[in-house]
Structure formats: structure tokens, C-alpha cells
Amino acid sequence: MNIFIMGAPGSGKGTVSSRIKDKYNLNHISTGDIFRKNLSENTPLGIQAKEYMESGRLVPDELTNAMVSDYLKSLPDAKNGYLLDGYPRTLAQAKAFEALTDGSDQAVDLVLSMDVPKEVLTKRITGRRICKGCGEIYNVYYKAPANEGVCDICGQELSQRKDDNEDSLKVRLDEYAANTEPVIGYYDDKDMVAHINADQSMEDIWSFIQKTIDEK
Ligand SMILES: [Zn+2]
């Protein structure tokens, strides 16, 4: 089974991805991992990508696609299929990947879209606070500490990540809406998308996802 998982920041995509990977024994791949591997091993594709990155240009979709495809082929247990996270990020990547894999055992079978209303994403991200001592994560809207700004477990001060503010989030959500939502629409037209109501408990989300994958 080959799966793409899509979701905006704060959608719970990371948690769900690790559960899917563990239960279905899929290769969990993020494009970040693939880039790092090619760069550190100085592969021909990595060397090309480095030239773009060092001159401050975007790595072209064709290069990203070729790296993803090579990476999938290089996996020792590629037969188990994959869970691709953060890719395809644009419609051009989706179409190129399709051209590269259509009819092969690397073609995608299912697209999971983690759907959460924007107001909920905003509360999840901007409300997040992290303990400087033990790393416990709180949320001022959903999981507030007993005393404001203080960790329940270790008593140390809570802090907010620099990017967890409304302005940074807006940039990321706009980028997602402009680039990735058209990708979901593209697979919607092919009837390949399972839309997950990700504004419910993780247990409910997880049972829906297992049912979706098992029935596929
Ligand atoms: Zn703590």
C-alpha cells in the first residue's frame, strides 16, 4: 500500500503518520530526509540540488521527483509500500510523480487528507506552550497548566516556540492553501482521497484511518 498523507501545520499529521508506519510496516518518508540523504552522500542528484540551494534558488520539481523515486527504489523493503509525508507539495510535483510511477508498484494507492478548520489549527498552534525543563507540551486552550506559565510536572517556566504565532502560521497556512490544496483537489477528482475529520479525538481519528486503510 502506497499512501500520501496531507495536512496543514497543527493537523496532527505527525502523530498519525507514526501510528500508520508502525501498524502497517510502511516506509515513512519525508522529503526532508531524502534531501539530507542525497546531500550527505553526494549523489549526482544531491550535487545538482546543492547548486540550486547554494545559489538561493528553489530545487526544481523534476529534481525533487527524481530523488523521491530513487529513494523509494533504494529501500530494502520497498515491497511494503510507503507513507509519503510532505510530498507532493505542488500540483506540478504530483503530476510529475504520476508520470514517473504510473503503472508501476510505486504508484500511489490512497491519499489521506487531515482536515481541520482554520480556527482550530490557529488555537492548536498559537496556544502551544512547552516546558523548558521537561519538554511537556501544553495548550492554553485545550490543556492548560494548573498555574499559568508553569509546568505541572516539574514546576519550570513554559515557553512558546518562535514560529507558533499568528503571523508565521498565516504564512504557512496560505502556502498550504495555494500549493497543496490543489494537489488534494487533483486526487479528489480521481476519487482517491479519504478526508479525515481531524477535529476530533486522536482515538476517533485513528480508528477511522485504520478502517479506511483496511478497506482499501
Ligand atoms: Zn516540566
Image: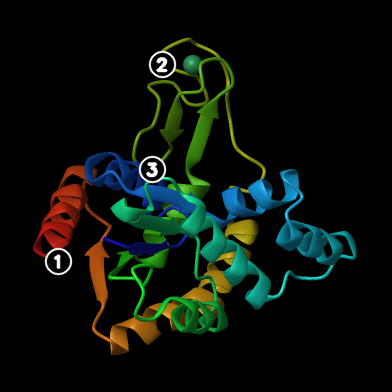
x, y percentage for residue 214? Answer: 12, 57
Quadrant of the rendered structure where residue 189 is?
A: bottom left
Contact (Cβ within 8 Å) of mark 2 with mark 1: no
Q: Residue at x 35, y 66 (%)?
A: 117
Q: Nearer the viewer, residue 66 or 187?
A: 66
Label 1 secondary element:
loop
Between the residue at mark 1 and the residue at mark 3, the CA separation in whole angstroms equals 36 Å
Label 3 secondary element:
loop
Pointer 3 residue: 141
Circle on res. 216: 1
Task: Classify 10 Å Cα crowding around label 1: few (below 14), some (14-19), many (20 and above).
Answer: few
Q: Residue at x 49, y 49 (%)?
A: 125
Pointer 2 residue: 152
Residue 162, compared with residue 150, is above or below; it is below
Hey, what amino acid is under mark 3? Answer: Tyr
x, y percentage for residue 215? Answer: 9, 63
Q: Nearer the viewer, residue 73 or 209?
A: 73
Q: Does the beta carbon at disc 2 come under 8 Å from ligand 1?
A: yes
Q: Nearer the viewer, residue 69 or 64?
A: 69
Q: Is residue 188 visible?
A: yes
Q: Horizontal placement of 102 versus 71: left or right?
A: left
